Image (cartoon, rainbow, N blue to C red):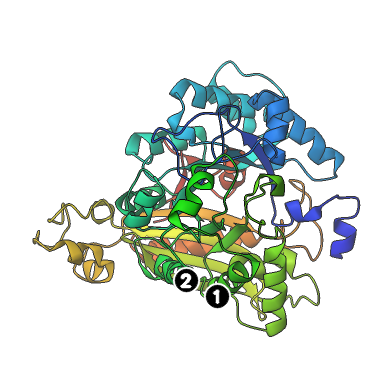
Amino acid sequence: MKYSKLVKGIKKPVRTISGVTPLTVVLKPRKCNHGGCIYCPGGSKVPQSYTDQSPAIMRAMKLDFDPHKQVKARLKVLEIMGHPTDKIELIFIGGTFLQYSEKYQKDFVKACFDALNLRKSRTFEQAKKINETSKHRCVAFCIENRPDNCSDKEIQNLLDFGVTRVEIGVQNPNDKIYKKINRGHKVEDVVLATRRLKNAGFKLGYHIMPGLPGSNLRKDLKMFKKIFKDEKFKPDQLKIYPCQIVQGSVLSKIYKKIGYKPYNDKQISWLIQKVMQIIPRYCRVMRIMREIPKEKMVFEPIKLDLRKEVEIGLRNSRKKINEIRMREIGFNRENLNLDLEMKIFEYAASNGKEFFLEIVNKDNILFGLLRLRILCSPCSQIDSSQLALPNCSHKKQLIKKNFINNSKKFRANCNQRGNLAIVRELHVYGQALEIGKHEKGISQHSGFGKKLMKKAEEISKKEGVSKIKVISGIGVRDYYKKLGYVLDEEGIYVEKEIN
């Protein structure tokens, strides 16, 4: 089927062009525990990092930030626009979710599930169970978080809620810059959070902010290179939000005194072009630019459609770009070659071994992907503060800090085979289709997911793993059951014996 026929009657089809329907819910206003970063504009009536003229915030304010009402309202709008609403990606924005009271967290999530289920449940667990087969299934769930809010207990809470993706505010991994902007955490927190979240199976996104006080274009480009070269980082996704001076922020009051000036369109365009050329094939740039009204800006705001201009320029130049979004089938619909193959890209990250599986055609257009993480669980728990390798099958030797952090040397000296395999993401791209619907020539519901899962099982078995786990959205559990997976004892992951 031609794409034009598939999206006929859908307003703004790009919203569901990647295979799921995003639905954003805003948390009630709350100050961060550390106070506030100098670039944050928010006050007591809106979430700290937003303004009262941002579209999502304005919608939430009209509904008094009520989660149930927000979900119902967005479902109605999406249906009117013609988008399928059976596969929902729930996205929480507006604050550091894990800094709210645990009661607020649980009540907020339950209210969202109740709205998706079109009925109120007696308990939180019942709400999740109903959503496995409800009309509007939560197939993915994302929250925004801080690196210093990723303790074992906090991560367990996220797993209990059904979260599958976590975005952390990294901004610029530099302790000197963190101090200048009153970030309230250190690079060490970013490294630890990255490893803990990946080990728990989450898909991990970084929020990066080029142009912060204390940085410049050269330093920012070096920073992006470091993020993908240093095994302590390597995120799955990026949101790139250039620093801008917003009315009401501390920065708007001190920028003259400190001699600060934000980047302009030309500078950001140059930087994004350079960055897009170094992003590896396993990473997707989710967004470039924050949607902040120009009336709130102290300087002329950077164009919101700057990304589109940069991508057009890169395509016309025929430069090789490996970034996921530019390779997705949904953004490359013309003259598609359907001679497909599966490719596997292996890389080391956060003391683990990552396998990035992708189904592509000869033009490198992406139809589907899977992220598989293999790790030796004792070794994966090592922090830079420890000097011994605990519980490993090789001799318990003392090593220096910098040797622990060099995971290539580290793995070479550990002869314990992988004993944990976890699928952190399975995603088939293309315009979202309703559950059970099939369209000839469309990538959704074409068996790609099954092929990717089968290959992941084969790799895990070869790596010496006897059981494979999957971090699954609540609404996707039924799909995995058909592939022979069952819910584990804790009710968190779906799993399968593969030996």
Q: Is residue 5 left or right of residue 415?
A: right
Can you say which quadrant of the picture contains the C terminus? bottom left
Which residue is outermost to the bottom?
A: 318
Residue 221: mark: 2
Quadrant location of residue 25? top right
Query: For this rendering, which residue is in front, 499 or 475?
Result: 475
Residue situated in front as seen by the camera: 58 or 323: 58
Where residue 428 sits, quadrant-wise, is bottom right
Find numbered disc 2 in the image and state the secondary structure of the residue it sits on: helix
Using a 10 Å C-alpha cutoff, classify the residue at mark 1 as few (fewer than 14 neighbours), some (14 to 19) or many (20 or more).
few
How far is the residue under mark 1 from the one under mark 2?
Answer: 8 Å
Determine whether, in the image, residue 33 is placed left or right of residue 425: left
Residue 96 rendering spot, x and y as whole percentages: 48, 36
Residue at left offset 12%, top offset 56%? 388
Badge 2 crowding class, 10 Å Cα cut-off, few under 14, some 14 to 19, many 20 or more, is some
Residue at screen point 45% across, 23% down: 101
At horizontal 63% and vertical 29% (from top left) the residue drawn is: 112
Q: Are marks 1 and 2 in contact (CB under 8 Å)?
A: yes
Q: If the image is split into quadrants, where does the N terminus sit? A: bottom right
Q: Secondary structure at mark 1?
A: helix
On residue 274, the disc is 1
The answer to whether residue 115 shows anywhere in this view is yes
